[in-house]
């Protein structure tokens, strides 16, 4: 963006709250829906009085205008607003009519209830479709950034192998190790501050960012706007400390926040340049958007001329968003990490995110678990399962006390999807491999899922060891041990299958 023509007298105004006029209008209607309903109904009654003072509700005409207006209000705002409209109509009928038209009133009430029910189910269906779409879009966005980060690491490794002592991949590994060390120190109150500080160190080391400021949002609450009151600030090693409010009002930073895109000083051809005099204290501002929420912004103040180019800025943009996603994963796991027995962190995060969607929006997902007591059998089934997964499905293998659990996650699908997947899997398994216990769990059955993964296995293990010790105290008989072992296994398999 060319800033050369900008006058220094221009005073930047905060534009982080900018929305389209349509969004503002719809938001205003929903926020003041009762007032809007009351105004529409009073206007309708006034018009009806001007047309026919004896039929203020216009129920005696050939066309039932009252049903039209009630249908519009109820379908748009819902049952509560429809009932408010009916109450206003009832009050008007009681005051202005000598003989109250009960039949017309009951028809209006019945249609309001029908329309209210339709609005409820239709809105619920739209919300579920929107949640599913957002989840898929977020997953695609995360995978795209992960792929691009890997590509950047490979390109930079080839390009700067001789010049730089470390590749980006090595730098990221170093940052991850530093973050792991940060996690181990419970005395650190704001760990996100340390994470972002480490990230600034990465930029200084790998991208020659001499001076920069990173502002990040405290917590991931979409109801709170990105402002000086809701953010924290991290300064680079060679950056003078300034209040966050002053930085957010800077022209370049404000422009980036308003449009939620990277903005940098550029020449007439659109290429980045650090040689122009501008009205900003910074040469680039890069926001980080995660799940359609502005979570951080990086403001670069000084950078070598040779490093300040479109390729480097694009790389920094992708890495900042990818890094912010990882921080978001940590925050969600801290709040909703309910299956810690699963060692794979990415799987636990997806489960936590889907459980959050269930708790907040009531959108269910399903977990299908295969319980196997043979390592070779579990490996064969696990490999087959991975080949049959769809785009958003995830699978992991958990070993616990002699059992092997193949845990499959079906995002935004009910148990019917898990049952269909199981039936398709059985078509590809041989008879010997097809014998194992399995159960499916919805998001509401989180406690039962953990019992299935942990407590039943531990109980089995303890009882098996008790049998072993009992036989050890006498003359150990391997045949007797095998018999008791088989009986115990059948008991647990039967119990879990019946449940």
Image (cartoon, helix red, strand yellow):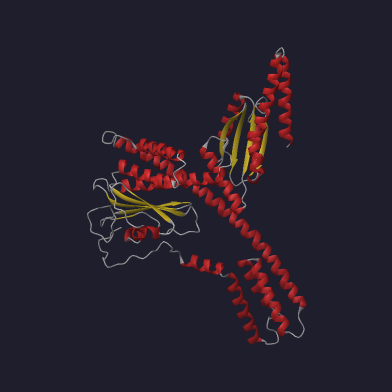
Say whether residue 496 is left or right of residue 150.
Answer: right
Judged from this view, the residue extending furthest toward the front is: 187
Q: Is residue 211 visible?
A: yes
- Pinpoint residue 448: horizontal percent, then vertical percent: 67, 40
Q: Is residue 395 above or below residue 61?
A: above
- What is the number of callouts on the image? 0
- Pinpoint residue 205: horizontal percent, then vertical percent: 31, 41
- Pinpoint residue 439: horizontal percent, then vertical percent: 67, 37
Residue at 36% x, 66% y is 13
Judged from this view, the residue extending furthest toward the top is: 475
- Pinpoint residue 404: horizontal percent, then vertical percent: 61, 29
Quarter holding the N terminus is bottom left
Residue 31, quarter of the rendered image = bottom right
Q: Nearer the viewer, residue 430 or 34?
A: 34
Say whether residue 296 is left or right of residue 414.
Answer: left
Q: In this view, does 100 lie above or below 16?
A: below
Q: Is residue 57 above or below residue 199?
A: below
Q: Which of 403 and 311 is in front in this view?
A: 403
Q: Can residue 435 be seen in this view?
A: no
Q: Nearer the viewer, residue 261 or 64?
A: 261
Say whether residue 14 is left or right of residue 59.
Answer: left
Quarter holding the C terminus is top right
Say whether residue 68 is left or right of residue 327.
Answer: right
């Amino acid at each position: 963006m060319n800033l050369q023509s900008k006058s220094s007298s221009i005073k930047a105004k905060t534009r982080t709250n900018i929305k389209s006029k349509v969004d503002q209008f719809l938001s205003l209607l929903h926020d003041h829906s009762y007032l809007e309903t009351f105004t529409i109904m009073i206007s309708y009654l006034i018009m009806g009085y001007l047309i026919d003072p004896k039929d203020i509700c216009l129920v005696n005409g050939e066309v039932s205008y009252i049903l039209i207006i009630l249908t519009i209000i109820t379908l748009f705002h819902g049952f509560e607003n429809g009932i408010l409209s009916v109450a206003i109509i009832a009050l008007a009928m009681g005051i202005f009519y000598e003989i109250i038209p009960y039949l017309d009133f009951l028809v209006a009430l019945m249609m309001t209830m029908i329309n209210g029910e339709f609005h409820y189910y239709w809105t619920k269906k739209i919300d579920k479709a929107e949640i599913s779409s957002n989840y898929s879009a977020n997953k695609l966005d995360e995978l795209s950034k992960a792929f691009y980060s890997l590509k950047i690491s490979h390109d930079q490794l080839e390009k700067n192998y001789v010049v730089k002592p470390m590749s980006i991949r090595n730098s990221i590994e170093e940052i991850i190790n530093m973050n792991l060390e940060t996690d181990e120190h419970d005395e650190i109150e704001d760990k996100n501050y340390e994470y972002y500080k480490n990230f600034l160190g990465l930029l200084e080391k790998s991208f020659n960012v001499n001076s920069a400021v990173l502002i990040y949002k405290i917590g991931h609450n979409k109801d709170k706007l990105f402002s000086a009151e809701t953010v924290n600030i991290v300064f680079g090693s060679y950056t003078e400390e300034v209040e966050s409010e002053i930085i957010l009002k800077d022209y370049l930073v404000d422009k980036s926040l308003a449009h939620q895109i990277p903005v940098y000083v550029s020449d007439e051809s659109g290429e980045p340049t650090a040689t122009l005099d501008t009205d900003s204290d910074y040469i680039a501002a890069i926001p980080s958007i995660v799940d359609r929420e502005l979570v951080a912004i990086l403001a670069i103040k000084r950078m070598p001329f040779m490093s300040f180019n479109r390729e480097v800025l694009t790389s920094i943009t992708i890495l900042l968003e990818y890094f912010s996603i990882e921080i978001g994963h940590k925050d969600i796991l801290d709040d909703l990490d309910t299956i810690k027995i699963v060692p794979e962190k990415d799987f636990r995060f997806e489960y936590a995110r889907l459980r959050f969607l269930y708790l907040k929006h009531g959108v269910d997902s399903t977990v299908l678990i295969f319980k196997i007591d043979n390592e070779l059998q579990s490996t064969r089934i696990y490999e087959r399962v991975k080949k049959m997964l769809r785009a958003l499905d995830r699978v992991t293998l958990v070993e616990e006390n002699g059992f092997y659990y193949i845990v499959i996650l079906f995002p935004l699908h009910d148990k019917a999807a898990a049952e269909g997947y199981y039936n398709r899997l059985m078509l590809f398994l041989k008879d010997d491999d097809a014998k194992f216990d399995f159960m499916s769990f919805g998001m509401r059955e989180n406690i039962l899922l953990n019992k299935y993964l942990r407590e039943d296995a531990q109980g089995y293990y303890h009882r098996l060891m008790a049998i072993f010790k009992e036989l050890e105290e006498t003359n150990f008989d391997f045949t007797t041990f095998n018999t008791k072992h088989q009986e115990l296994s059948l008991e647990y398999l039967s119990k879990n299958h019946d449940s």
